[in-house]
Amino acid sequence: MTADSPRPITDHTSHPAWLPDDAFAAIGSRRVVVAGDGALAGTVAEEVAAATSRFGGAFSRLEVGDGVADAELVLTLTPPDAGGGASAVAAVDAPGTDESFRLTREAGAVVVQAACDAGLLHGLFHVVRLGEAAFDGPDVDETHAPATDLRMLDHWDNVDVHPVMGQVERGYSGGSIFYDNGFVHADLSRVERYARLLAAVGINRVAINNVNVHAREARLLTEDLGDVVRVAAVFRRWGIRVHLSVSFASPITLGGLPTSDPLDQGVAHWWVRAAARVWDAIPDFGGFVVKADSEGQPGPFAYGRTHADGANMLAAAVEPYDGLIHWRAFVYDHRQDWRDRSTDRARAAYDHFHPLDGAFSDNVVLQVKYGPLDFQVREPLSPVLAAMPHTRVALELQITQEYTGQQRHAVYLGPQWSQILGFRFWDPAGREGGSPTVADLATGRAKAVEDPGTGTWRKPAGGFAAVSNVGDDEFWTGHPFAQANLYAYGRLCWDPTLDPAAVLDEWAGLTFPGAPDAVRQALHAVLDRSWETYEQYTAPLGVGFMVRPGHHYGPDVDGYEYTPWGTYHFADRDGIGVDRTVRTGTGYAGQYPGPWSAAFESPSTCPDELLLFFHHVPYTHVLHSGKTVVQHVYDTHFEGVARVEAMIEAWSAVSGHVEPRVSERVSERLAEQLRSATEWRDQVNTYFLRKSGIPDERGRTIF
Ligand code: GCW
């Protein structure tokens, strides 16, 4: 059976990102068989049919027992115990949650086998990523499975345009693909293209509204559920489940109850009924995301209850449907008095949540930002990640570049995430088979490891979540190169051990098919070290912030210094940095397991890049690098700008080889990056010169 009218997949209005038609050339020019039932097998068949009709290959959809003798690629659902090779074709029930697949290449024929249709879909995109390489080379027999079932994106999209935050909070890519000024888009074709891109990198859950839930957004849970049903139907075709952010005060604001006390029976019943309505309408709905008692969002503290009380009440309501509660650990006092040196925002999440370890229900995932502050270019890892052995902990990353250049600067975050994922809390040296990495903690692989004082880690794990960087911009992400961050996030969720440079290579190959190798090399020249470059020209040595309050773009060294937000650097004429030691400071360093609390406690063992996060030191303090703090600041800021100039040079040499619309957007953004980096350099250097009175030993211009 051949599908005669494949759905069109060409998208003429937005950039195709990593799925241009040519990415399917290798598959499309071959004889391909798709076998098996299930919705996602249908999606796979449509993709293959469209590709083969475009590139002159042949496509057939098989029934049980049909021959596949001359096929070059077979994508088939098989019983788990079937053998390898094309002969194994059989129809099995597609539904299920197993996303793994087996890839074999034998005598020139490539076979992707999966027990469930989700696995078939991931297998298809694996072959797409391999391109011609899928069909060349020696025989293989590999099994691929994701590191975790929970690979989630959070959208901070508002239904209404927020007077301050706009349509998408911290969005740098135009409007929302879901909402337009108070409504869910009637035409969800953009969402469909997005879902397809996400499926191609392995994302399988999306929370579609901002964690700051305002009045209009709250109603998605109730009267506007029909719109969520429409969005979920689109994502479902790509193996992605939808989640909603909900307000803890919903029983009051939507239900008219006098309270949202989690221990109140009426409140609990209200949530039970709300959950029943949601799952009745969307049987594969994922669950709720909750930002509680954080930056003005309501929570259990108002009733003298703990966050476990709050989360568990919701967890009970969604438990009958295997639903999840993603409960965010981003809880701190944002009305702090800057005069009060004893309150340390960095301590807050651990202080709130560590005592609750073991108290959360099995279907609660504690979602923890990677650092204790807020997605800075450099922070130590949140000690909460290591402090909750009996809790499902998810690592939260920020793809949207709130503090990393807002998608006007080219900053490839893959290397940062890779470093985070590979961090070891208990054994910094990372003995082979030794203590778990952050990726192990998030994926549940740490469960077998016995650690001093922590016992075993329980499964299932919490997986990954990240704030999406996508909007209705022509390029999805504002900066075309910011697509690489979304791509890398998906790939690292699937396999946290991937090399970020190899992932960038993959992205470049798919996004710019047929471009000369010089383009790929230029992308590496621009992006490989761009995270470090951004760090060089912005806030130094882990001190963080120094951004313009409110919108967070561009330098303002003292912008947050006397504010209630708890983000200070304490610069005076003698020195700078925050004393977070146990001995003389806020005690934050003591929240880490042994090796790191000891290392962070002393400036002599604290890693240079985090020195000012943990210590207040004189400008003349000598780093491990041999430079003084102030000279390091000058040198890195001059070098950072020089590197941006080199990025521009590298890109100009090849920009003529890519579509004009891409090259124009990139060039425009690089020019802004240079302007902004120069401003950062001059403000930060001038600030340090004026505070310290110490001149640059190389006599460069500082103002
Ligand atoms: O990074 C900060 C942002 C807020 C955001 C908050 C959070 C959605 O500045 O805009 O609110 O974190 O993570 O909840």
Image: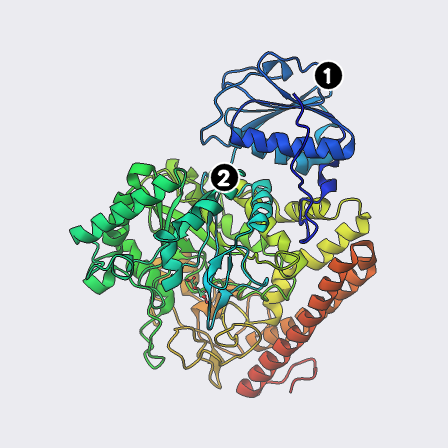
Q: Quadrant of the N terminus?
A: top right
**Pointer 1 or 2: first along the chain:** 1
How many angstroms separate mark 1 from mark 2 (CA)?
Answer: 32 Å
In the rendering, at what x and y percent does residue 397 appear? 49, 55
Q: Residue at x 52, y 52 (%)?
A: 186
Residue 122 position by quadrant:
top right
Q: Which of 384 and 247 lies nearest the eye of the viewer? A: 247
Q: Is residue 304 left or right of residue 293?
A: left
In the rendering, at what x and y percent does residue 68 appear? 67, 16
Q: Residues within 10 Å of mark 1 (few under 14, many from 20)?
A: few
Q: Residue at x 66, y 81 (%)?
A: 697
In the rendering, at what x and y percent does residue 651 appear? 77, 61
Residue at which label 2 appears: 236
Q: Residues within 10 Å of mark 2 (few under 14, many from 20)?
A: some
* Mark 1 sits near ligand 1, with its Cβ under 8 Å away: no
Q: Decide: is 378 above or below 617.
A: above
Q: Amino acid at mark 2?
A: Arg
Q: Is residue 489 left or right of residue 594?
A: right
Q: Secondary structure at mark 1?
A: loop
Q: Which of 677 and 659 lies nearest the eye of the viewer? A: 659
Q: Quadrant of the C terminus?
A: bottom right
Q: Which of 700 and 673 lies nearest the eye of the viewer? A: 673
Q: Residue at x 61, y 60 (%)?
A: 531
Residue at which label 1 appears: 70
Q: Secondary structure at mark 2?
A: helix
